[in-house]
Image (tube, rainbow, N blue to C red):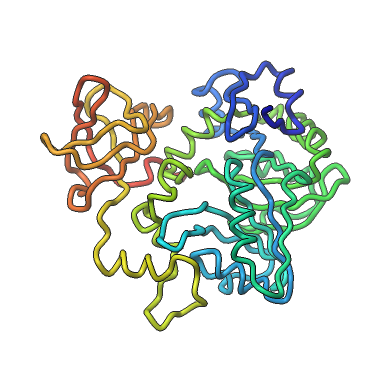
Amino acid sequence: MLKRTPLFEIHKKLGARMVEFGGWEMPVQYTGVIEEHRAVRNSAGLFDISHMGEIFVTGEHARDFVNLITTNDISKILDGQCQYAACCYEKGGVVDDVISYRFNPKKYLIIVNASNVDKDFEWFQKNKTAGVTLENKSSDYSLLALQGPKAQKILQPLVDYPLDKLVYYHFCETKMGGKPIILSRTGYTGEDGFEICGAWDDAPVFWELLMKEGASNGLQPIGLGARDTLRLEAAYSLYGHEIGETINPLEARLGWVVKLGSTTLDKSDFIGKKALQEIKASGIKRNLVGIEMVENGIPRQGYEVFSGERKIGVITSGTFSPTLNKAIGLALVESGFGAVGSELLVQVRRQKLRGQIVNLPFYKRK
């Protein structure tokens, strides 16, 4: 049995095409991926991401525990801030990529990927230390994402908090429609926007309020199809594609959230730190690069990448970019073959088609 979010009936009423995703029955599109994608880039889009997981970490040693299980340094942020990080296995592979919300030094919320909720919680419990309480409250909370250049204009009349004061990767506790929410300025599209975390049963109220307020500003419901093309243009990693148990964060261009420091450490140890230090010292063997196709063909996940006759890597994600009007992809290739401007070949079905390595991200908002 597939799980359903509290907005399932609304999606069906809107005529969404539903698909299986991470054990959930989710909308992949409403009117069409390209139209929905462009709505987010030009005005605003509303996403149901209630399938994502919410794990609370509390207790006297909560901060130290979050530092133990994540690669970033949680001690560097203040109350009301969020932090992106990876969680790693002992050998350096990625358990998941997460966002941690700091309420205070003894209370954190960690947002995890939908397909990984149970696995992550078990891994957290396995590594739990004294003075820490873990609660998986994923079934108690809904999550909506409002993304696009008009997101603030749409949301502001619905909340009391002055949104121009809520800067990127910060959050606040406020109310919408008289109901409590945790509101963060975060997102997965490359646009400005917000993520709204509230009670599971309140999601339909939040959805209807936002859609009504956004009607005059071009707000559209957005499915998983456009969510993927948007995140790919912004070169954001997707678990199981750019990161995973066999792909470490240093290979995946996530070294900026891995605080290795020196062997004497500049933050508390984290799981996988020793392995990542050794990987860095011995030289990273693969790198994630961006590819724009020169010849017609879309680089799909799993397609092989060549330099001449030599196989050098594989496509991790690929699509046709509605913003750039080009076929683009992310690829994990051998170090030494990732120079920007260089050409390579992508095996698209029976043909090897030319592509060029380009700077990332493919798209960056002005």
In-front residue for pair 316/118: 118
> What is the x, y in percent for residue 55?
68, 55
Query: Is residue 275 rendered to the left or right of residue 159?
Result: left
> What is the x, y in percent for residue 48?
67, 35
In-front residue for pair 206/161: 206
Query: Is residue 123 rendered to the left or right of residue 304?
Result: right
- View extreme (right): residue: 178
Q: Image quadrant of residue 15?
A: top right
Q: Image quadrant of residue 216?
A: top right
Q: Which residue occupies 44% across, 48% down?
A: 244
> What is the x, y in percent for residue 238?
47, 43
Q: Which residue occupies 70% across, 19% down?
A: 14
In-front residue for pair 106/221: 106
- View extreme (bottom): residue: 264
Query: Is residue 308 rendered to the left or right of residue 263?
Result: left
Image mark count? 0
As displayed, is residue 259 above or below residue 31? below
The quadrant of the image that shows the N terminus is top right
As displayed, is residue 50 above or below residue 273? above
Q: Which residue occupies 63% across, 28% down?
A: 26
> What is the x, y in percent for residue 113?
58, 45
Q: Which residue occupies 26% across, 30% down?
A: 293
- View extreme (left): residue: 308
